[in-house]
Image (cartoon, rainbow, N blue to C red):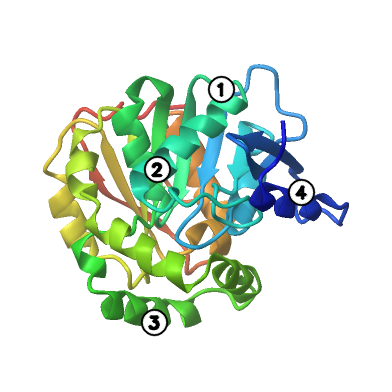
């Protein structure tokens, strides 16, 4: 099968280099597009599958700190969706439904029938849309710092929110994010922003009927306050567990990987959400909302 010029261009990037992660770095080709991803090198044979879905304009690289902490317990995948990071581009891959279908195509390609999905920022509506179209293929959803909707409109407001968030993130985040944003490009940014803010995230969230964890950063300027989140979450009584991570901003997967991985483990095993006593004094996790039909915590 002959490759398109775009696909051939991305083949050049397969030259050996020093791995950026303890996860195995791999490539696959889906519908003629080269897709880069990371995977647990030696997952347990009976491990549950967990895929991490990145945010707006970024690759999966900034998700690695949390994904690496979970990779020995879960069969972990961290893809760069088509159009992002090191993966090839597709002209039709710049709205939320397209990215949800691309996630399903990636899991198909890897032979994965069901998985739990962990997303940050834009990755959260992608997961919600995936669950809408493929409800039998998702076990649990972890939505970290969900983005999109009215609170991030118009574009100048979102830019202002991002500018306030930047100094709240670790400085090393810029070394990861800036190259990704430059590669993603201005035209793609404008188009995807419109799609993201027009996506009916709340409506889709309330339709979910799977265990869902929402993790919010106390210092995240891209999200409304916890009281508004509680008000929204209380509109459903079946599935949503909302926790607030003290001291965190938007990119929790990068800035607080140990704490986030801890919360995800507890959620996956239906354990009470509690802080680890070994955490620094300025980091705590608080439960904001628990749907009455959410699976009850199991005591040790």
Q: CA distance from mark 4 to mark 1?
A: 25 Å
Local secondary structure at mark 2? helix
Where is residue 195 shown, x and y percent of the image?
Answer: 30, 57
Give 96 or 253, whichever is nearer the viewer. 96
> Residue 262, relative to residue 228: is it above or below?
above
Local secondary structure at mark 3? helix
Local secondary structure at mark 1? loop
Residue at the location (49% across, 60% down)?
Answer: 252
In the picture, the disc for residue 98 is 2
Residue identifier under label 4: 11
Residue at the location (77% across, 34% down)?
Answer: 41
Q: Nearer the viewer, mark 2 or mark 4?
A: 4
Residue at the location (30% across, 26% down)?
Answer: 295
User: Of callouts 1 and 3, which one flags the residue occurring earlier in the amino acid sequence?
Assistant: 1
- Where residue 13 sits, quadrant-wise, is bottom right
Q: CA distance from mark 1 to mark 3?
A: 39 Å
Q: CA distance from mark 2 to mark 4?
A: 23 Å
User: Of callouts 2 and 4, which one flags the residue occurring earlier in the amino acid sequence?
Assistant: 4
Counting every numbered tag in the picture gives 4
Local secondary structure at mark 4? helix
**Tags 2 and 4 touching, CB below 8 Å:** no
Task: Tell me the crowding category of disc 2: few under 14, some 14 to 19, or many 20 or more residues within 10 angstroms, Cα based.
Answer: some
> Residue 292, relative to residue 244: is it above or below?
above
User: Of callouts 4 and 1, which one flags the residue occurring earlier in the amino acid sequence?
Assistant: 4
User: Residue 278: in sight, yes or no?
Assistant: no
Residue identifier under label 1: 112
């Amino acid at each position: 099968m002959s490759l398109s010029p775009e696909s051939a261009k991305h083949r050049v990037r397969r030259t050996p280099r020093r791995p950026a992660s303890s996860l195995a770095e791999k490539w696959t080709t889906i519908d003629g597009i080269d897709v880069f991803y990371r995977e647990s090198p030696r997952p347990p044979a009976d491990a549950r599958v967990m895929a991490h879905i990145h945010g707006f304009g970024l690759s999966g690289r900034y998700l690695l700190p949390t994904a690496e902490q979970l990779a020995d317990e879960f069969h972990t995948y961290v893809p760069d969706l088509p159009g992002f990071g090191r993966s090839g581009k597709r002209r039709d891959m710049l709205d939320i439904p397209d990215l949800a279908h691309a996630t399903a195509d990636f899991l198909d390609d890897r032979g994965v029938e069901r998985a739990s999905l962990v997303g940050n920022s834009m990755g959260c509506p992608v997961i919600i849309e995936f669950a809408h179209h493929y409800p039998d293929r998702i076990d649990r959803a972890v939505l970290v710092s969900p983005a999109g909707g009215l609170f991030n409109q118009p574009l100048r407001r979102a830019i202002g929110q991002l500018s306030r968030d930047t100094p709240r993130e670790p400085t090393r985040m810029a070394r990861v994010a800036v190259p990704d944003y430059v590669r993603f490009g201005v035209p793609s940014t404008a188009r995807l922003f419109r799609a993201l803010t027009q996506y009916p995230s709340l409506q889709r969230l309330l339709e979910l009927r799977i265990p869902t964890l929402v993790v919010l950063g106390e210092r995240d300027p891209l999200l409304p306050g916890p009281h508004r989140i509680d008000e929204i979450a209380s509109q459903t009584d079946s599935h949503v567990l909302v926790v607030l991570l003290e001291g965190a901003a938007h990119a929790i997967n990068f800035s607080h990987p140990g704490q986030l991985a801890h919360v995800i483990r507890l959620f996956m095993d239906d354990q009470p959400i509690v802080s680890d006593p070994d955490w620094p004094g300025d980091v705590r996790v608080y439960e904001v909302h628990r749907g009455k039909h959410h699976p009850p915590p199991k005591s040790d």
